[in-house]
Image: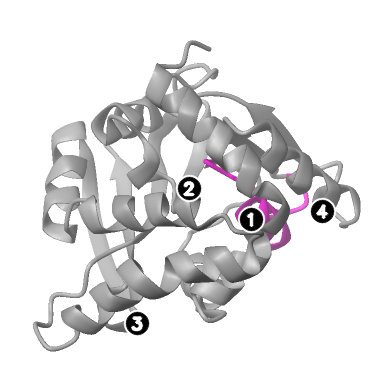
Amino acid sequence: MVQSPKNTNVSAMFDRLAPEYDRMNNIISLGTHRHWRRKVMQKIRFSQRDDILDVATGTADWALALAASSSRQSRVEGLDFSVEMLAVGQQKINASLYKDKIQLTQGDAMDLPYENNQFDIVTIGFGLRNLPDPKRGLAEIYRVLKAGGQLVILETSQPQNRFIKPFWQLYIRKIVPNFGRVFANGKHQEYRYLDETTEAFMDFKSLDHLLAQVGFIERKTFSFNLGAARAYYGIKE
């Protein structure tokens, strides 16, 4: 795996965030991120035997949810570039019922260490916006999916309503960094970076266009919390 300097810096930042990451997710999303993931999971089509990849798995919450929802014969691979995030995730997996079903791997989402046409389902939750080149990351996901395989994205988004958006911007720019200062041992700069990537990330129409460019068909999307987050689905042709 070869990482750019920017990628290496982001990886180091997530290593620093790992100890408080789960708690901060609950605080920042006001606990709603679990609801978002449950709703997204309801639309995934599982079969009797799936090979599943969770890209940017972080502390493995989605990998664990996928393991719980898929068949006993299915296997889940979780990939992330942060060693410390994976260490937290492995602890959770070891304490779960799915330690023989989930494998965690350190790797680069823009250079996936897998063969072509290997997975039936690929998910990525709140990780696409952190890639230096999202299109390349999506192309890699397309490559490792089997024909007819499912891509599922859960990502932050920007509210489109002109009355809601100012309050969302205030929350993202002012309140969330202070959560990092108070609840994450003073790591307000790290959470300021995450907020900046949230604001700078493409809107849902642009992401849908990107998915079409990569080759995904049967694309669908829906929003949560007045547009603060959004799910995307696509099929490899």
Please, which residue is most extreme toward the bottom here? 163
Instruction: Identify the mark nearer the N-term, 4 or 1.
Output: 1
Amino acid type at mark 4: Lys
Query: In front: mark 4 or mark 1?
Result: 4
- Where residue 174 sits in the image (x, y, percent)? 35, 72
Mark 1 Cα shell of 10 Å, populated few (<14), some (14-19), many (≥20) = many
| Residue 79 inside the magenta-drawn segment | no
Mark 2 Cα shell of 10 Å, populated few (<14), some (14-19), many (≥20) = many
Q: Which mark is residue 123?
A: 2
Instruction: Identify the residue under disc 1.
Output: 66
- Where residue 88 sits in the image (x, y, percent)? 76, 47
Q: Which mark is residue 92?
A: 4
- Where residue 46 sits in the image (x, y, percent)? 56, 56
Relative to 154, 185 lies left or right:
right
Q: Secondary structure at mark 2?
A: strand
Instruction: Identify the residue under disc 3.
Output: 225
